């Protein structure tokens, strides 16, 4: 199906189609025999989707686009230092086939000119020429995601006529840059240039570079991440022969072209682009390929120096525990304390990539307010990547805050902080979910600021708020209807799907309602403490329990069964009205609290109930 | 206060401090007289914070760092085409003061070598030399955010001894590149090089470039965004004299150095870096400045080709209206229909920057599922930037979906889509808030799939669900207690802060509860229809209304006043118990619905009430 993206790429293709500038390479007859009007434009994403226009399946020889790939293989085989001792990385300002070295360093100026590329070929590991070529061919095939083969006729023609490259080989040998038989290095270079690719292959090769060296479809690694940046850097400064400066200003993407008519360009982290059109301009670049890349970069806004806007803050939102409480139910005194000092515990939700610039804005904002805070929760759940420097900055932030009397914790279920790193104080907890971190921050405030009225470990039945305000006779009546139940810690009191068990009053211990997600992880909905109740919703409106209820600790419960609750209507209507009114009040209070809590900071509290 | 970022920058500073490589520039005596060990390192963010280490206030002459600034001013004064006709953008591979032009184009190779810089100076607009220099000085001052001045001794010394640059000027005149008096252009160049800056100034100049041409603190524009990319491109390919290739591989930032000892580097969109250290290496770059930039780039991971990870999807989350309903209350038949077909209306929440790559992943994902959808809501509230191509892709997506029988709308309160653009079909609504868009999507489903049982325009009192199940006597009793009230559309029935008005039954029309945010914008909490009630929460638990209640249309209400509700306890306890039980049931049902709705997709529904 043709998508809106196909349409946009198709328009670029159509705008360039009429370009007949340039001429076929003719230094060997095979290159002069291709159809001059062949034209393809492919864009591959880093998740492996390929948009194709034109002759995407036409095979042609890779030629100089092999240079960055072999250079990358040499980096992997020999290491960057050994390669740097043989090949510089400066743009030459000279044609690609110049028989010259840098007059000062006596090295090839860069790996994208022939002298540097032949040197890179001489650095490929392998016991004999056949094995070295097979390693090169397999490497390119990994980039492309399919087995690539040699165009033997092109290779033989290159080998027969390539005196200039042989001259370069011998020059390299005479300066000690190539240390073995220079003809073998030149022959490997001829072979690598003669490998057949399609425009689709080139787009996937580019996408593999964009994807940090891993093929987007096969998941196989073609180049280690630490070498990808080096290869892309050299493509940026030297990839387009002696038109590199104009390419950077007009296209702004690391790129490489070949005299076979191919061009590839890379937007790091995002997409790979390839064009095939065999007519070449005076620099030896595909004339229509350069135009198509220029148009595509402008149309799709791909220039790597494009500044869309200033970096946004890494802080997605921030709020305090008085506006976004934990799901731990609190006593009246605790609630009052949290209402009073809740602004002293602040949550910072970060997002995006936490590289230096984002982390800098975040730690600066947190540190600015630290004197007014007792506890800080840094929530990393929405963060995509945490760079090394950001990891260190967050660890330092925690130390810095602690020295100023403010405790700091992190919500980091994905392990961005690398919990085993020595820089993270292991005595400090890191939480897997926000709710528990909020509870920690609330407890931190309560320990510092709440002098009394903390939720007791146990209450007497007469002190349970559901029964507050009953007459002595009403209390005696209801007390006789209640069954006392003891549950050990860890016991599941009610299971999802259970029928109503009645109205359950908590006298001691803690119980949590738990939901188990599709992936098996448990989330608590709420934790209840002595003086609270559960079970009234299924009892009042029917239906089954939707979640598990589990005793967190040893728990004592008082249960009014559904049958006894029903019988109260006739036996003690005044008592029942008092209970139901308390329950309705509780429901509305909870509704208010739930909407405040779940709606997040600044969310309005409702005033209204409804019926329908 | 020393922050964690200061500490990291301080470490880089300390690691470089011992570097005594290189020598002071000595072609004029003034440059050889500075303190050779002076050293400063500054980092400025695009929101204007500057981290400073060392001699951040020491003044020195800007020298060649003036070149990109004057080049930018020439682009603004003459336009890119006129400038391109005079100055190429190719790296030269030659020393900066070479007296040569490109042999083919007969133009200076780039604006970062002296020949190109003198040409750029000759293009500055102004009636006379004094005005031209004043325009240059004011331009640089805007970049720095303070008034900069000339170092007259350095200028006079340069002017007295600058024969090589005068030779370049006359060469340029002889080739027709400079068309007026070449000595005037060379003199302006000497003056611009002699402007004094501090390392802090350079960091803010770099941050201004990073910030797309606008000074982060003053908000004044130094360079138009369309020229920033060009200037940064030329700095990338040619900024570090003939060490540009090594700079790209090792530092990977657009940069410029000067023989006064300054270096600045730009991470587009994020930060500006500056170093001052006057000992120069063989290329003419600050030796310790290059080291500090290399260390800083590696430590802070600033290389512009760094691929942290593959591009993330622009889709932050997606869900369907059965999991995240609107706040429009629905009838039972409507709710059943939405439960059955709610998956046919899908919300896509996008985030981050919507440039090509992000928009591509989003439109591809939406289009893939379109055959199973009747309605799509694309929520742009969390999007930071929408590029031109993404805007077009979203408009095309809507057209594409419509052709496939799926309607599409956008939530776009910030106007990212440019509502006046002709590409957006004006007959299609764009919503300012998600809730109204959800209601639109639900209505779309109900129109297609709900055959009957839609909420009626009006109901009789006997059909109101609050009164369902009452005996005839109970109904007659309550009917006599109710006052009928008619409210016109737009009338505010209850205001925030009002005392309880009783329990209000809706018989016809629609009412919404409204909260007004701090910025004056109104948000609806819920919209209620015939058969629903409001006002029970303040009546049952006391307190005042927290929000306005407004009649959206002409509305008929039946009101049970708080006094009459209270009196029922004695007068008709069975009736009151029935009503309170219905209200409690309603509250729990609403609690369930509120938590489903506000908790977002996948949020668990609670089973539990509580009291405390």
Image (spheres, coloured by chain):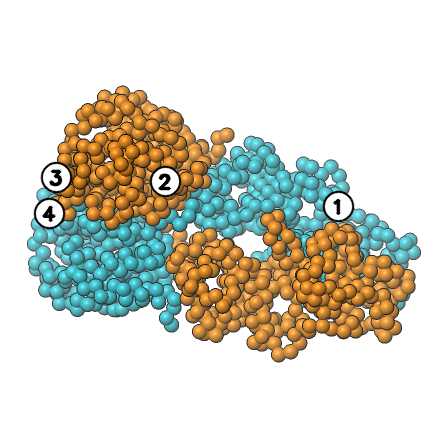
Chain colours: A orange, B cyan
> Which element is circle 1 on?
helix
Q: Residue at x 76, y 73 (%)?
A: A460
Quarter in which the N terminus of chain B is drawn: bottom left
Q: Residue at x 19, y 67 (%)?
A: B37
Image quadrant of residue B598? Answer: bottom right
Labels 1, 2: front one: 2
- Is B423 left, or right, of B80 in this rendering? right
Report which residue position mark 3 lands on.
A174
Report which residue position mark 4 lands on.
B99
| Mark 1 surroundings within 10 Å by alpha-carbon count, few (fewer than 14), some (14 through 19), many (20 or more) | few
> Which element is circle 2 on?
loop
Labels 3, 4: front one: 3
Q: Earlier in the sequence, mark 3 or mark 2?
A: 3
Labels 2, 4: front one: 2
Image quadrant of residue A224? Answer: top left
For the residue pair B154 and B522, the one nearer the viewer reads as B154
| Mark 4 surroundings within 10 Å by alpha-carbon count, few (fewer than 14), some (14 through 19), many (20 or more) | some
Labels 1, 3: front one: 3
Q: CA distance from mark 1 to mark 4?
A: 86 Å
> Quick check: do tags 3 and 4 share a chain?
no
Report which residue position mark 1 lands on.
B332
For the residue pair B217 and B275, the one nearer the viewer reads as B275
> Quick check: do tags 1 and 3 share a chain?
no
Point out residue B161 in the picture as x, y percentages from the top left corner: 7, 58
Marker disc for residue A222: 2
Q: Decide: is B97 above or below A466.
A: above
> Which element is circle 3 on?
helix
């Amino acid at each position: 199906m043709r998508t809106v993206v196909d349409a946009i790429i198709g328009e670029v293709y159509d705008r360039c189609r009429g370009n007949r500038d340039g001429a076929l390479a003719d230094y060997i007859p095979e290159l002069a025999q291709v159809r001059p009007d062949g034209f393809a434009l492919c864009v591959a994403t880093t998740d492996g989707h390929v948009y194709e226009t034109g002759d995407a399946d036409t095979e042609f020889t890779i030629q100089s686009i092999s240079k960055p790939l072999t250079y990358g293989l040499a980096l992997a085989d020999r290491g960057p230092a050994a390669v740097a001792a043989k090949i510089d990385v400066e743009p030459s300002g000279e044609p690609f086939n110049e028989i010259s070295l840098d007059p000062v360093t006596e090295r090839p100026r860069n790996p994208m000119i022939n002298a540097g590329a032949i040197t890179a070929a001489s650095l490929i590991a392998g016991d004999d020429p056949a094995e070295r070529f097979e390693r090169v061919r397999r490497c390119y095939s990994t980039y492309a995601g399919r087995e690539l083969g040699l165009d033997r006729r092109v290779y033989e023609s290159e080998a027969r006529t390539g005196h200039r490259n042989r001259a370069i080989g011998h020059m390299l040998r005479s300066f000690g840059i190539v240390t073995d038989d220079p003809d073998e290095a030149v022959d490997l270079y001829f072979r690598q240039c003669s490998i057949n690719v399609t425009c689709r292959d080139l787009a996937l090769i580019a996408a593999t570079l964009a994807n940090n060296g891993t093929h987007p479809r096969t998941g196989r690694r073609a180049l280690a991440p630490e070498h990808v940046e080096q290869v892309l850097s050299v493509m940026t400064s030297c990839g387009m022969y002696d038109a590199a400066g104009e390419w950077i200003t007009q296209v702004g993407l690391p790129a490489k072209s070949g005299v076979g008519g191919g061009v590839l360009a890379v937007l790091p982290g995002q997409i790979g682009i390839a064009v095939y059109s065999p007519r070449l301009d005076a620099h030896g670049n595909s004339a229509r390929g350069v135009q198509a890349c220029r148009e595509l970069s402008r149309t799709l806004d791909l220039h790597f120096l494009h500044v869309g806007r200033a970096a946004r803050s890494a802080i997605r939102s921030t709020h305090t525990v008085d506006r976004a409480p934990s799901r731990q139910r609190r006593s009246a005194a605790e609630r009052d304390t949290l209402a009073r000092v809740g602004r002293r515990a602040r949550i910072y939700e970060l997002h995006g990539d936490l590289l230096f610039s984002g982390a800098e804005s975040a730690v600066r904002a947190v540190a600015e307010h630290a004197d007014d805070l007792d506890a800080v929760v840094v929530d990393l759940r929405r963060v995509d990547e945490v760079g090394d420097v950001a990891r260190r900055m967050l660890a330092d932030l925690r130390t810095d805050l602690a020295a100023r009397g403010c405790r700091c914790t992190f919500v980091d279920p994905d392990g961005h902080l690398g919990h085993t790193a020595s820089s993270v104080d292991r005595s400090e907890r890191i939480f897997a979910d926000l709710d528990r971190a909020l509870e920690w921050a609330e407890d931190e405030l309560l320990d510092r600021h709440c002098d009394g009225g903390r939720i007791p470990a146990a209450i007497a039945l007469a002190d349970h708020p559901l029964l507050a305000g009953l007459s002595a006779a009403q209390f005696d009546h209801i007390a006789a209807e209640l069954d006392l139940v003891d549950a050990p810690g860890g016991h599941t009191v009610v299971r999802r799907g259970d029928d109503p068990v009645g109205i359950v009053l908590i006298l001691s211990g803690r119980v949590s309602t738990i939901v188990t997600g599709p992936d098996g992880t448990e989330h608590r909905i709420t934790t209840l403490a002595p003086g609270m109740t559960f079970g009234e919703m299924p009892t009042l409106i029917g239906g089954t329990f939707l979640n598990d209820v589990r005793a967190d600790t040893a728990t004592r419960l008082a249960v009014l069964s559904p049958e006894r609750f029903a019988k109260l209507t006739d036996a003690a209507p005044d008592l029942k009205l008092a209970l139901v009114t308390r329950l309705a009040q509780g429901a509305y209070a909870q509704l208010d609290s739930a909407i405040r809590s779940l709606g997040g900071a600044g969310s309005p509290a409702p005033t209204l109930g409804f019926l329908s």
